[in-house]
Amino acid sequence: MPLEYYLLLSAILFSIGAYGVISKRNAIRMLMSIEIMLNSANINLVAFSSYNTPFSLTGQVFVTFTISVAAAEAAVGLAIFIGIYRAYKDIDLEKIATLKW
Amino acid sequence: MIDFRPFAYLIPILPILGFLLCLLFGKYSWRRGGMFANLTIFGSLIISLGILYNVYFQGMSFYEKSWNWFYPGIVFGIVVDPLSIVMVCMVSFVGLLIHIFAIGYMGEDPDKFLYFGETALFTGAMLGLVLSNNFIQLFLFWELVGLCSYLLIGFWWYKPEAAAAAKKAWMFCVVGDSLFLLGIVIVYNYMFSAPGITEPITFSQIFSSLETGVIPPPMLTLVSLLTLAGVCGKSAQFPLHGWIPDAMEGPTTVSALIHAATMVTAGIYLVARTFPIFMAAPNALWVVAIVGGFTALLTATMGLVVNDLKRVLAYSTISQLGYMLCMLGVGAAIGAYAVGYSIFHLISHAFFKALLFLGAGCILHGLWNIRSIKEMGGLRDKMRITSITMLIGALTLAGFPLTSGFYSKDKIIESAYEYGEIASKTGGLVHYLPWIFLIFGVFLTATYTFRMYFLAFTGKPKTYLAEHAHEPKPISSMIMPLIILAACSLIFGILTQTKFYDFLSTTFTTTTAYMSALNFEHLAKMGGNPYGLEHVETPLYIELLPTVFVFLGIGIAGYIYFNNRVDVGKYIKKGNPIYKIVWNKYHLDYVYRNLVAEKFIITLVILWDVFDLYVIDGVVNGISWLTVKSGTVIRRVQTGVVQNYATVILLGIVLLLTVIWYFGV
């Protein structure tokens, strides 16, 4: 199976995640789209590592780090959204526009 | 004998120091002011007389010293040569006498210390003007003198006429001064880049470079005419002569100092100092002669109809200044001696005009400030010394034989005739015009002077105050200067005539360390002036003509006005058109005030105001409006919704990648 298939998968997942970030009103959906983008980057890393340097597990180790970072970041993001909900009683991202002109 | 020449820089500095002292401590000094001014001017007089003794009697050479000022080449300097020496002596001597008179005259004035401070500053500025060796310094002192004239004319500022007269004097002077400054700028422009010139506007260097043609002849004429414009403003020649009659609102000693002896002669001094430039400029001296002669005649006619004692003297001042200017103008045919003749008349004029003004001051003091001669009369008996000295002054002004006025005026008229003779051979009969102006001026001068004298001093007193006039005591600060000046105006002419001319003619024709002798024949050829072409002998009847006119004038004045024999009002009614034109000063005042100032200048001012309000302010306001308007449009980019920002970032990345893919890295 050529490497390009994995890279294509990663690209498609990244695009799906990007679309979700910019178009979803619900804050939780936006966070989930961000997770999709992060995971697409992980797939990219593992694919390159396993095809180009088969006996050096550099990519896989790197992915271990990024998965934990993604988890922490999701926790922080959810905490921020809980705070926002307390302030605005709503997490529709189009309504939270206090820095408007 | 001490060499006074290196101390020449003290001559102007001492009175300016006196000004500061008077201003700061004058209130507390003896009799509330005046001592500092008088003592410092006395000091200047000592130094001036010392320098005169050094240069003339001991034969020391001329002296010039410059200090560099704010730019290399622009200097602050003094020049000691015959022209400046005689001017300095005259200014300090006559100034000292007038200051002594003013101690008595301004006796009870509350601002006495201020008066003496301002006159000290004025004397210092005039002395500095005369001693300057370059244009910029001369212009600086020129303006300073004008400033002091403004301050002193408006000394009694609470009188509205005095304030208006001061403003008028300043405005007329400033018109001339701006044109003069333009002339200086033109001179600098050409001298600045000439080879071998270290000090571009110093007189000695300008004169040395005249022959090499650094300044092209049309520019020389322009510079001369602009200088003449400055002279017209300051020395009150036509058409800027209107300020002097109004300037009589100031104290009489101010009129004596500024408008008779010193400030108005600054213009004549300027033309005398820059005489080589005028000589080398084509057609310049002709204009000078015409302006001077015309003014002499015009203001002599105006002097015939005024009834204010001081105004008669004012018009006679302008007339005599016209004589001096005309003399310098006809110097086209006379050469270096023209300076001598003109300055001789200047100095004798200083003596007799100061005498006349101080005498008028005595009269005003004794008559509680009545100024109209129609209300005086019979003062001969009440004010003996004043009447005798004023008679001497009037005779000198008219040019009675054997007074100094006779010698000076006759020389001028003779020179005008010589100029007419020589120049009309090539230029036509119109060159006799200065002589014609001057001759009729002599007649009118004698007439109006003695009209004033007879109306004021002979006949019966016309008012109560004239009956009870009192005169100051003979040995007082007010009478002594009169006597001294009367003596000077009598003997100055006889004693010093030819020696004076010779002394002054060496001003430009001596080789000093700073300037080589100017060859006036070369300069005259450059300017197309008829100097040195031939020698003309004036016939005897021409030489006697002025004296004949003097006697004729005095006789006519005596016939009409002595003891008020003839009532002129019966023959010339008030509605007589010629009388009305002359009485209204040829409507020049009307032209300047109503037409030029209130119609023309105000229109320009309004146009400028509109331009300022709508165009300039409009541009500034428009820029700010544009900024605000575009801001309101562009700020809508900040929506506050985070996802919009994320969208923009993504779009940017896509664009970047596309560009990199298409065009390479």
Image (spheres, rainbow, N blue to C red):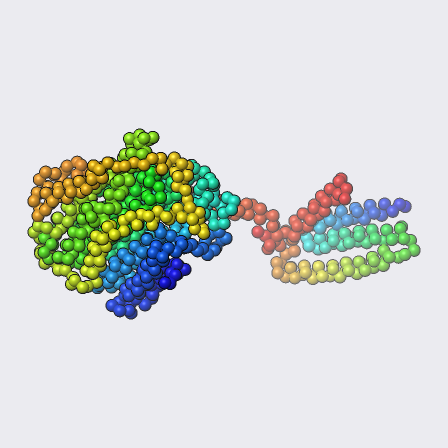
In the rendered view, tell whether residue B157 sits above or below residue B532. below
Identify which residue, B509 or B552, lies in the foreground.
Answer: B509
Quadrant into which the C terminus of chain B falls: top right
Task: Confirm whether residue B545 shows in the render.
Answer: yes
Residue at left 27%, top 56%?
Answer: B94
Q: Please state if A84 lies on the left or on the right of B233 as rendered.
A: right
Quadrant into which the N terminus of chain B falls: bottom left
Task: Confirm whether residue B125 shows in the render.
Answer: no
Q: Where is residue A46 in the image (x, y as percent from the top left)?
A: 85, 53
Residue B119 placement: quadrant: bottom left
Q: Please state if A71 lies on the left or on the right of B6 as rendered.
A: right
Identify which residue, B133 or B166, lies in the foreground.
Answer: B133
Most distant residue in the right direction: A55
Q: Where is residue B627 in the image (x, y as percent from the top left)?
A: 53, 47
Identify which residue, B283 or B331, lies in the foreground.
Answer: B331
Q: Where is residue B275 in the image (x, y as percent from the top left)?
A: 37, 44
Residue at left 26%, top 69%?
Answer: B30
> How many discs mark residues in the rendered view?
0
Residue at left 25%, top 59%?
Answer: B97
Q: Please state if B332 lies on the left or on the right of B646 as rendered.
A: left
Residue at left 64%, top 59%?
Answer: A84
Identify which residue, B169 or B83, lies in the foreground.
Answer: B83
Q: Where is residue B177 in the image (x, y as percent from the top left)?
A: 36, 47
